[in-house]
Image (cartoon, rainbow, N blue to C red):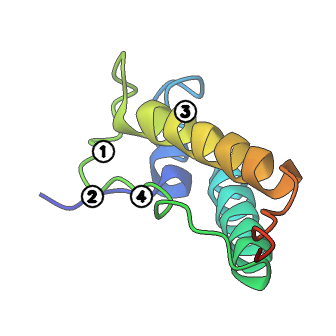
Amino acid sequence: MRTKTPSQANSSSTSAAAVPPGDALARVRSRFAALSRSLELRSLALRTPPPEPTTCCGRGCNGCVWDGFYAAAEWWCDDAQDLLASPPAVAPSPG
């Protein structure tokens, strides 16, 4: 069975609410890249972003794998932003 991307699935007769538009995936990828770069520049460690689903059937299922992905993506981005907003760790002074 061939997996559809969100933009392919959106072009079929599926519910638009269940299958996000293709530009949503591009926005998430861009956010992942920008936040990952910022974390790397500050030498901050965070788990890897959630992987993109590979099993969407494109039928607009209740609880679609894309819904779960976008929720996990939002949580990851929130965690990354919280980590970036935290004050830098200060090394204890010797003595």
- How far apart are the alpha carbons under marks 4 and 1? 10 Å
Amino acid at the residue labelled 3: Ala
Q: Seen from this angle, which residue lies furthest front?
A: 95
Residue 70: % across, % down: 55, 39
- Tell me: residue 66, above or below residue 27: above
Quarter in which the C terminus is drawn: bottom right
Disc 2 versus disc 4: nearer the observer = 4
Q: What crowding class fits label 4: few (fewer than 14 Cα within 10 Å), some (14-19), or many (20 or more)? A: some
**Residue at mark 3:** 71
Amino acid at the residue labelled 4: Glu
| Helix, strand or loop for disc 4 | loop
Task: Name the residue: 75% across, 66% down.
Answer: 35
- How far apart are the alpha carbons under marks 1 and 3? 15 Å
Nearer-N-terminus badge (4/3): 4
Q: Seen from this angle, which residue lies furthest top?
A: 62
Horizontal relation, residue 23 to residue 66: left or right: right
- How far apart are the alpha carbons under marks 4 and 3? 12 Å
Q: Is residue 47 visible?
A: yes
| Helix, strand or loop for disc 3 | helix
**Residue at mark 4:** 52
Nearer-N-terminus badge (2/1): 2
Task: Name the residue: 87% across, 50% down.
Answer: 85
Residue 61: % across, % down: 33, 22
Residue 78: % across, % down: 71, 41
Horizontal relation, residue 57 to residue 43: left or right: left
Amino acid at the residue labelled 2: Thr
Nearer-N-terminus badge (3/2): 2
- How far apart are the alpha carbons under marks 2 and 4? 12 Å
| Total tally of numbered discs in the picture | 4
